[in-house]
Amino acid sequence: MSKIEGPYAFVYVDREQKHVWYARDYLGRRSLLTKTMDSGAMLVSSVADTADESTAWTEVAAQKIYCVDLNARTLDGGILEYSWQYAASGLEIGAEDEHLVLPFGRVDQTVDDIGPISDVASSVQLSDLAEFPDICKWQPYIDRLKSELTQAVKSRVDSIPPNGTHARCGVLFSGGVDCMVLAAILTTVLPRDEPIELFNVAFENPRQTKLQSLDSVYDVPDRKTGRLGWNELERIDPHREWRFIECDVPYSQVIEHKPHVQQLLVPSCTVMDMSIGIALWFASRGHGTRVTATSRTEYMGQSRVLLLGMGADEQLGGYSRHRSAWDKSGPHALAREIALDVERIATRNLGRDDRVVSDNAKEARFPFLAANVVAFLSQTPIAYKMDMRYARGVGEKLLLRLLARQLGLVQACVLAKRAIQFGARTAKMESSQTRGQDFL
């Protein structure tokens, strides 16, 4: 198993030994759930059977491989667990069958490379990459990140079967730096005659409509940055057919499909889960309007594989809590927070996201969570991934922003992080009093 790279979830029945093996990949990129019935029987499934029993289903922990011994009289004591571990000194990956060795190490928490910063440097907005201080020190890391991400994207699209003149691969697209870099790299690895679909989702939010005067109810933050990003991609690669798809979701459709999405979320069951899940579901469905410079036509997405930017924020300091850790306690606290976030990737929401996207017969692939990318970023010192002494929109995910600027993404490289539920306006549709952690 240590030699397998990529997302998976499986149930394997060994009839001869009377064993049932089941697991998810070590980062939890595919969904797998379990539930124990009152009769003592255990169910293993990629999705739950009903939203009414959300507490009965649990996500299979991604850090282990499980074996059920059918010779045992009960499940108690009949489930063996084999845990993934970081490589120990002298232990090579795959050296022994009984060792499940991760293909990446722990996050390097070194902060010794952080030097003084001038008042002039702190005001840098990356308008010109040459203006960035000490760019020569950063350049090897920028080039390496580009190389690792290119390898990750290429391996995730090369396996997609040809689709005639249709698009094979799309990007869930807000115009933010994560998806912009993925799209900019994707265009370098796909054949020149293949179109790339950019799915940009926006919601009619009744509460926001009452509060603000908008030209369109779909004139949400992610729509504005999405259009800018699409224009920027056309500028850096004018020979590619970029298909910008505006997926507009009326509030009536949210109400109609909300029960179905809620069932897909199980065992996740908070208001925030719904806000994120319903945005991903409508975006991955791909129904919308294809926009060109001269026309707008109804469109249904063709891609069966979608690239998503999950994993960039955890590894590169994209969350507000990362800046808060820096502000409160300095670089060592930031390093600890990043290490903790990377450790928790496998226990967070990738299973939920997989259930939502795959319901539309699409497969989500995550280049930022490719083993080679995680390995590189884990061994890169914190000081060469982010620098919170710079302003918001620059200091967080600084390494990725520098790569974006090198790729010609002048506007995207200075956009601040914005969560999908706020960018697409799925948060607080009915009331401003609801909180993300509230249960549905």
Image (cartoon, rainbow, N blue to C red):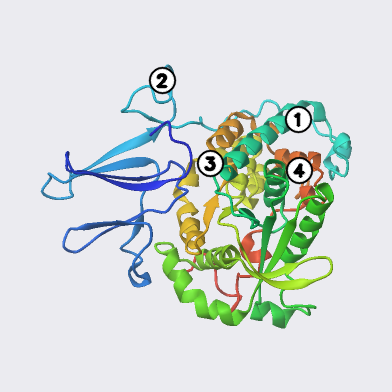
Sequence-first tag of 2 and 4? 2
Amino acid type shown at disc 3:
Val
Amino acid type shown at disc 4:
Ala
Q: Mark 2: give few (<14), some (14-19) or many (20+) Cα within 10 Å.
A: few
Q: Residue at x 85, y 38 (%)?
A: 129
Sequence-first tag of 3 and 1? 1
Q: Secondary structure at mark 2?
A: loop
Q: Is residue 131 left or right of residue 67?
A: right
Q: Mark 1: give few (<14), some (14-19) or many (20+) Cα within 10 Å.
A: some
Q: Residue furthest left?
A: 73
> At which x and y percent is residue 62?
40, 45
Mark number, residue 138: 1
Mark number, residue 342: 3
> At which x and y percent is residue 426?
61, 70
Sequence-first tag of 2 and 1? 2
Q: Quadrant of residue 201?
A: bottom right
The nearer-to-camera label among 4 and 3 is 4
Q: Is residue 317 left or right of residue 346?
A: right
Q: Is residue 340 left or right of residue 416?
A: left
Amino acid type shown at disc 2:
Leu
Q: Tell me how far mark 2 sits from mark 4, CA to CA.
A: 37 Å
Sequence-first tag of 4 and 3? 3
Sequence-first tag of 1 and 4? 1
Q: Which residue is mark 2?
A: 91
Q: Secondary structure at mark 3?
A: helix
> At which x and y percent is residue 334?
62, 40
Q: Secondary structure at mark 1?
A: helix
Work out whether residue 439 can be spotted: no
Q: Mark 3: give few (<14), some (14-19) or many (20+) Cα within 10 Å.
A: many
Q: Tell me how far mark 1 sits from mark 4, CA to CA.
A: 13 Å
Amino acid type shown at disc 1:
Trp
